[in-house]
Structures are given as C-alpha cells and as structure tokens.
Amino acid sequence: MEFELAPGELRTVEDVVAVMGTTGSGALRVFASEPVMVSSRTFSTGVDGTFGQFLVGVATPDGLRTGESAVLMQLREDSTARSNIGLLNGGRRAARVQVELFDGSGGLIATKKRKVPAGGRIQLDRPLRLFGRKSFIPDGYAVVSVLDGVEVVAYGSVIVNATNDPTTIPMKTEAATDQWVAAAAHVGGEFGSEWRTDLGLLNRSGDDALVNISFTTEGGEAVTDEVTLADGEQRVLEDVVARLGVEGSGSIRVTSDRPILVTSRTYSIGDGGSYGQFLDAYPSAGTVAHGERVWLTQLQQNELFRSNLGVVNTGSDEARVRITMFDHDGTELASRRRRVAHGGRLQLQEPFLQIADRDDLTAGYASVEIEAGEGIIVYGSVIDNATNDPTTIPMHR
C-alpha cells in the first residue's frame, strides 16, 4: 500500500495487515521519501476490549551485526505467563543467529541456532518450554548473538495466560551503573485500575554486583533498598514499590558498583489477571537535554482509550519543558510550560481532555521541548478504558 503524508500529519492505519488484503503474521517494512517516525501497537481483542503491546519501528542500519549480542529480560514460562522470541533480519543476506536461554540464577537451559532469511522473520514460540523443557521459569532471560549477518533485531513477548495480554521485551545491549525507570507504582487509578510494578535486574558483569534501588514518590519522599546479584543472575522484584514499604507512584533510580541491565513491567491487576506495559531503564546517555525536542505518537483520548504523559528530571538542576499537543493533521491543540524539580516527575493525566478539551481523538500526538535542564526522560501511556490495559509510548527523537 502507498499513501502521502502531509507535513505534521499522523496517519494511523488500523488493522494494517487486513487493510493490505491479507492475514497472518510477519514483519512490516516502511519506505518513505522523507524521514518519518514509525510505531505500532499489536493487540489481542476480547469481549470487553483490547490487550496490546507497543512495537517501535527500527531504522536501518540499526540492529546487531556479526559478533554482537543482545539480551531479552524478564521472560517467563509458568502458569501465569508464556514467552515468545522473534528474530528479524533486515539485511540483504541470510543471517545465522544463536539464542541462549537462562534461568534466573544464570543457569544455561538451552542453546539453539537458527538461520533467518534476508528480509525475513522467524518466531520461536515458548522456547523455554520447547527447547529447555521447563514449565516453571518465572525469571528467565535470553542472550541473542549474531554469528553471521547484519541488521538483526531480536525481541521478546510475554503473554499473560489468563488475559492474553502481551508485553513487548525489546533487546538490550548496554549495561550501566546509574539508570532510571521513569514510572513505577503501587496505587489505585481510574476505572478501578490497580497499578503495580515488577523490576528486573540482570548482572552479566563477571563478578557480584551491589545494587541500590531508590524510589522517589510524587511528594519527593525517597526510600531505598539494596540487593546483591551474583554474576549471571537476574532478579525480578515483584511489586517493587510495596517491597520498599510504601505506596503511590513515582520513579526509580538504580545504581550499582558494576554495570547491570535494568527493565520493568508496570501493570494493572484485575480479577482475571494482569494487563501490563514494558518500561525500560534509561542511563544518562539515553536522556535528553536543553535544546532537544522529543515526540510521542499514537496517543488517543476518546470513549475507548485515554492517554497520560510523563516527564522525569534525572538531572542536577530544575528543568523547564514545553508540552504541545496536536491533532492527527498537525493542528496545534494546546501548549503548556511546566517546571520539573531535580529528581522529580511530572505526570499529566489525560492532557488532551484536561488541557486541550478534546475527548474525540483517535490519532493525536505530542511534543516535549526541553527549554532548560538535562537528563530528561519523556514517556506516554495509552490505556484501554474497558480493560485498563496500558501501552507504553516511548519518546522519539
């Protein structure tokens, strides 16, 4: 399919595979005459609503090359959830890829090698069970290595068995000693939602790592805890905010004496199970600063979905940001300036409704311009009103 986008336009192609006149699963490749931002939400439909996950477009020549590896964290195979792994080859020749599966203690469960055709994708369904012959792995992870090839992208998907809600697990390549998770919670929300956060910590540094976890509430109160991770160990701290002895929402800072990998899943719990979203940890190199502008796409505010927007200041000084909201055609709806204290977090609940006075948007977007400060993280969250299933919208540069 082919179409034109006007300057500033956001086009959402609903059920894109069906629109293209086919069925099945696979990869989408988008070519454009000018640079564009590409994102997607893949979801399961139920009687009450949808359960989805965000998948960002990966620009060539991004991806892994021969000799490079990436990690997929917080995989599980048990009565609660199941995990799949996908391998995409954006290169022009076949790639050979090795997948190593580990349990939480760092024990190797299985190793598999696969050939991925040029421009092709393969999916390993429930590899912890199929290859590792394990039915109880609540804290597994995978290491994906490219033996031969270029532009290889790996991803995971963890699906809650009771709800069929998927959470995307993007590949991670860089460990760090100082990282931030922009949002974490143990709190009630709108439409009867109950929010919780599981924090994933993985140490592949070669030695034991001492890890400090600091949660800062909306009111500025900070609580901390320490854990020690053996080399190769992944620790998943379930409902981490409650583990720290507090309630509410805020952000998490993770510091360690050795470089580690950090991820999180924030979810709403219901009678039938949980509905969650992946929230990655950002080292300082992944944040934005004065003079930069980032974008949040695929936002909605209507009877079916609501959207929130958050800004976290990990820098040493107060930050000033300008938040602008747009309709799908690029029309500016509203703009506000906000200050965010050092170490603080600003969350705007339903800003398209509360600030722009719009409740009929199916394809809006927002920009956040950093007017002062550094170490800024911006994120969005789109929530299905019927199921309280959230989808994280990461910032685009």
Image (cartoon, rainbow, N blue to C red):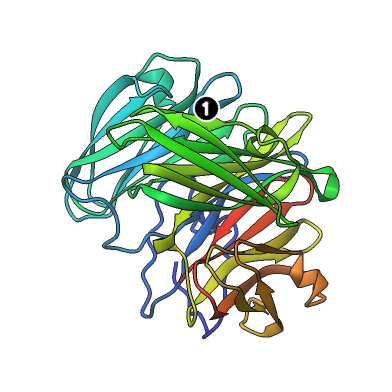
Q: Determine which residue is flagged by label 1.
A: 82
Q: In the image, 114: left or right of 138? A: left
150 above or below 72?
below
Could you say where residue 120 lies in the image, as x and y percent from the top left? 30, 47
Does 66 sit above or below residue 362? above
The image quadrant that residue 308 belongs to is bottom right
Which picture quadrant has residue 163? top right
Image quarter where the N terminus lies is bottom left
| Residue in front for this viewpoint, 97 or 75 | 75
* Residue 259: percent from left, percent from top: 35, 44
- Find residue 206 and report its horizontal and vertical position in percent: 27, 33
Q: Is mark 1 on a helix, strand or loop?
A: strand
* In this view, 109 is above or below 97: above
Residue 25 visible? The answer is: no
What is the three-letter code of the residue carrying label 1? Arg
Q: Residue at the spot x=54%, y=59% of the render? A: 19
